[in-house]
């Protein structure tokens, strides 16, 4: 009997030491993707195949996003990083921030993993909405068979230079609307429906909580835009542009993987959001770049108001590790360097170890192929 108890105790201990992490797709939908969980490739199917400008069906974009594995252990680490960063940023509380970390390059080449702290909490988007508008604009151009459009220069100005006026022209192009006097009855309902075109598109892809139907104003919005904004809230309006850290990170991942609208559109957007890390370290709003070591590469978008500072960036460290980091922040008085502190911790961990080693070599469940 004593020997039996000893054997059971040893087996139980071994089970704890080799505990498996149960992973699930970030979105619930059928997955029919990669050849193997240990040799992951997005394998996006354009139509016709091989054509960079060929449309990527919405179902394909959704499928690729479904392959992102939700990692509770990685989320625990992201919360630890958040606590460390908050300790260096006085005046910020945990309810004022949201952080998502999407690890692309893993040791075993398996599907990307995402971990987050408050990653599904909608927060004011600021200029992060421009990344969504850029994708929506290329989708609209594709639907209308528009090529070599002048709207591309506005997309570039919007992304590369954070040009609000160019962004507003992009919003008008996407929605087929324009700002102006207040509307009533059916006219207002038509206006509101047109402005929600991008929201309907992104919901088809799988983004459930995003709201991108507003322009960018440095002064008072036009009367009909104020109607659409709705009730004034302490920080913004009830219908202000909002994103979650998870969904902003997922969108940038789709762009990186050439998995939304078309490969050509993704490549153009990537060229527009390519940023020089050393140059981005200069100035007041350094953000994620200031936390990165020399030799890093970065693609991303950031935005700020007097009460928000948000950023999403795809980072390649000198050792080749690649990840998407999204940090959303709101504050009462002045800009905090929270995103820089989170970036510094994430980069340090990425340079010293990988996500696979972080969980004591626990077996990672690969994404299901959908084929039984």
Image: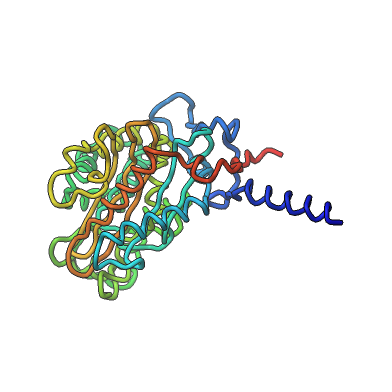
Residue 360 on image: x %, y %: 55, 44
Q: Is residue 119 above or below residue 277?
A: below
For the N terminus, the quadrant is bottom right
Seen from this angle, which residue lies furthest front? 2
Q: Residue at x 16, y 38 (%)?
A: 279
Give the mark count.
0
Q: Is residue 301 above or below residue 192?
A: above
Residue closer to the observer: 123 or 358: 358
Q: Residue at x 42, y 51 (%)?
A: 202
Residue closer to the observer: 184 or 138: 138
For the C terminus, the quadrant is top right
- Work out whether residue 47 can be spotted: yes
Residue 67 on image: x %, y %: 53, 43
Q: Residue at x 32, y 66 (%)?
A: 96
- Tell me the quarter of the picture where residue 211 sits: bottom left
Seen from this angle, which residue lies furthest top? 50
Q: From the viewer's perspective, is 330 left or right of 200?
A: left
Residue closer to the observer: 57 or 280: 280
Residue 204 on image: x %, y %: 47, 51
Q: From the viewer's perspective, is 34 left or right of 50?
A: right
Residue closer to the observer: 12 or 123: 12
Q: Is residue 364 above or below residue 295?
A: below
Looking at the image, what colour scheme do you see? rainbow
- Work out whether residue 204 can be spotted: no
Residue 312 on image: x %, y %: 32, 48
């Amino acid at each position: 009997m004593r020997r039996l108890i000893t054997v059971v105790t040893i087996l139980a201990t071994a089970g704890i030491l080799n505990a498996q992490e149960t992973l699930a797709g970030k979105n619930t939908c059928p997955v029919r993707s990669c050849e193997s969980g240990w040799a992951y490739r997005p394998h996006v199917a354009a139509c016709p195949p091989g054509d960079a400008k060929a449309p990527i069906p919405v179902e394909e974009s959704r499928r690729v996003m479904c392959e992102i594995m939700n990692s509770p252990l990685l989320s625990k680490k992201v919360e630890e990083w958040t606590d460390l960063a908050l300790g260096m940023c006085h005046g910020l509380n945990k309810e004022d921030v949201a952080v998502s970390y999407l690890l692309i390059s893993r040791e075993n080449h398996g599907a990307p993993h995402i971990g987050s702290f408050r990653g599904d909490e909608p927060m004011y988007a600021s200029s992060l909405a421009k990344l969504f508008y850029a994708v929506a604009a290329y989708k609209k151009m594709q639907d209308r068979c528009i090529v070599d459009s002048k709207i591309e220069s506005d997309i570039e100005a919007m992304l590369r230079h954070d040009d609000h006026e160019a962004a507003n022209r992009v919003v008008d192009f996407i929605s087929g609307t324009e700002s102006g006097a207040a509307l009533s009855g059916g006219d207002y309902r038509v206006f509101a429906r047109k402005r929600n075109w991008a929201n309907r598109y992104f919901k088809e892809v799988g983004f459930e909580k995003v709201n991108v139907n507003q322009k960018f104003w440095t002064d008072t919005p036009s009367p009909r835009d104020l109607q659409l904004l709705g009730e004034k809230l302490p920080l913004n309006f009830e219908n202000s542009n909002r994103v979650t850290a998870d969904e902003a990170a997922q969108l940038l991942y789709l762009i990186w993987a050439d998995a939304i609208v078309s490969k050509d559109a993704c490549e153009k957007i990537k060229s527009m959001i390519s940023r020089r890390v050393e140059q981005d370290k200069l100035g007041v709003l350094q953000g994620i770049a200031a936390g990165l070591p020399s030799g890093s590469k970065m693609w991303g978008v950031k935005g700020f108001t007097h009460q928000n500072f948000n950023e999403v960036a795809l980072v390649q460290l000198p050792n080749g590790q690649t990840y998407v980091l999204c940090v959303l922040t709101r504050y009462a008085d002045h800009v905090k360097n929270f995103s820089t502190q989170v970036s510094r911790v994430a980069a340090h961990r990425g340079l010293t170890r990988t996500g696979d080693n972080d969980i004591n070599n626990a077996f990672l469940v690969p994404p299901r192929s959908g084929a039984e």
